Image (cartoon, rainbow, N blue to C red):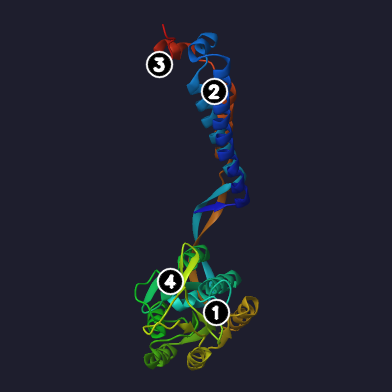
């Protein structure tokens, strides 16, 4: 397991391409200036030991040296020991609606991005709970199984989009049924499912049946609504530019609305609570309060311990490259010149 102490220093890597560009522009300027002074044959006679290869090699050494020094500043660490620790928490599954209606922009920047930010902020407030993620539209798809790896959860969360599922629609019942399979501990007393959606449900007749079944197995269902009740059209974009608005079979612009009624009904029947996701801070505080009130289940989790600094390796390699750059001269090397490896013999 690798840990990075000071990621902000990665921005310094921008120096490397700047140096490379400056080198190429300098070479172009030199060639133009030299042409004004003399032709190529005369220049070779005036500077017979000038090596073209050495200049490029010095640039490579300088670039590599700076790169390794910057990585040393970041200070990579490697976990050297895997320990099993006791943790207490709740099993939480997030079911995120990725149907096309989540592209509506009645809440900035759009419903889906707002939902992802909400989940990410909730994860930031967790300490030792286990989490899983489900994506659903016309069907449900497991995105991340129950885990304590919050970093992986955020990575998977950010990659979710409305094109990841080919089957469109909004089948909340499928998400609830799939979430029921996530809880692998029969003794877990607190199982929580957060459904983050605009509430458009194309399977209302079977959704409440799924809620009842999940509730009987000890799953508490909370719903988080994203969007506005007055609704908004669904933009169809290409390369970030709106080309048109989604229309129905009659050619009318589709207006998608936040359905708080169905979301509240699901939460009530699922022994949970409906939460308005319009204000991220208020929603996260309310959810944290709810989770803090729940009994925690003790479970075992493996995690790396005893991280050791590795910056010294990168520092040593970086200094070595800079040392080579300083002592590597621009003129041709005599013994290499005799071997003629780089075709450096003077023209006769």
Residue 141 appears left or right of 17: left
**Front residue of 77 and 38:** 38
Camera-nearest label, 3 or 2: 2
Sequence order check: which comes first, mark 3 or mark 2?
Answer: 2
Q: Which numbered circle lies on residue 296?
A: 1
Sequence order check: which comes first, mark 3 or mark 1?
Answer: 1
Q: CA distance from mark 1 to mark 4?
A: 34 Å
SS label for mark 2: helix
* Above or below, comparing residue 338 to residue 27 in the picture: above
Q: Position of residue 74 (x, y in %)?
A: 60, 47
Camera-nearest label, 1 or 2: 2
SS label for mark 3: loop
Q: Position of residue 77 (x, y in %)?
A: 55, 49
Residue at image location 34% in from the left, 72% down from the top: 166
Q: Position of residue 194 (x, y in %)?
A: 50, 80
Sequence order check: which comes first, mark 1 or mark 4?
Answer: 4
Camera-nearest label, 2 or 4: 2
Q: CA distance from mark 2 to mark 4?
A: 53 Å
Q: Residue furthest left?
A: 167
Mark 3 — residue?
Answer: 343
Q: CA distance from mark 1 to mark 2?
A: 72 Å
Camera-nearest label, 3 or 1: 3
Mark 2 — residue?
Answer: 31
SS label for mark 1: loop
Mark 4 — residue?
Answer: 162
Q: CA distance from mark 3 to mark 2?
A: 20 Å
* Above or below, comparing residue 198 to residue 109 in the picture: below
Q: Position of residue 158 (x, y in %)?
A: 50, 65
Sequence order check: which comes first, mark 2 or mark 4?
Answer: 2
């Amino acid at each position: 397991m690798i840990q990075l102490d000071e990621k902000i220093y990665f921005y310094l890597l921008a120096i490397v391409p700047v140096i490379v560009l400056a080198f190429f522009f300098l070479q172009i300027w030199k060639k133009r200036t030299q042409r004004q002074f003399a032709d190529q044959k005369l220049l070779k006679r005036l500077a017979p030991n000038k090596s073209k290869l050495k200049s490029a090699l010095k640039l490579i050494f300088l670039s590599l040296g700076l790169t390794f020094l910057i990585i040393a500043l970041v200070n990579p660490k490697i976990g050297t020991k895997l320990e099993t620790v006791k943790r207490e928490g709740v099993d939480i599954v997030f079911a995120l609606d990725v149907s096309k209606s989540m592209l509506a922009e009645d809440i900035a920047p759009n419903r889906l991005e707002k939902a992802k930010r909400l989940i990410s902020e909730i994860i930031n407030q967790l300490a030792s709970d286990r989490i899983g993620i489900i994506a659903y539209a016309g069907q449900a798809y497991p995105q991340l199984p129950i885990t304590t790896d919050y970093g992986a959860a955020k990575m998977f969360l950010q990659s979710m989009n409305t094109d990841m599922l080919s089957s469109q629609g909004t089948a909340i019942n499928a998400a609830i049924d799939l979430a029921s399979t996530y809880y692998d501990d029969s003794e877990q007393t607190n199982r929580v499912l957060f459904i983050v959606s605009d509430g458009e449900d194309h399977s209302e007749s079977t959704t409440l049946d799924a809620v009842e079944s999940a509730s009987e197995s000890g799953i508490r269902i909370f719903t988080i609504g994203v969007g506005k009740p007055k609704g908004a059209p669904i933009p169809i974009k290409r390369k970030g530019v709106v080309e048109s608005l989604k229309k129905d079979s009659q050619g009318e612009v589709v207006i998608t609305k936040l359905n708080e009624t169905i979301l509240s009904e699901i939460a009530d029947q699922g022994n949970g609570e409906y939460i308005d996701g319009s204000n991220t801070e208020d929603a996260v505080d309310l959810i944290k309060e709810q989770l803090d009130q729940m009994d925690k289940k003790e479970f075992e989790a493996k995690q790396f311990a005893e991280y050791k600094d590795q910056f010294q390796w990168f520092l040593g390699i970086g200094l070595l490259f800079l040392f080579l750059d300083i002592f590597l001269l621009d003129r041709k090397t005599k013994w290499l010149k005799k071997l003629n490896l780089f075709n450096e013999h003077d023209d006769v």
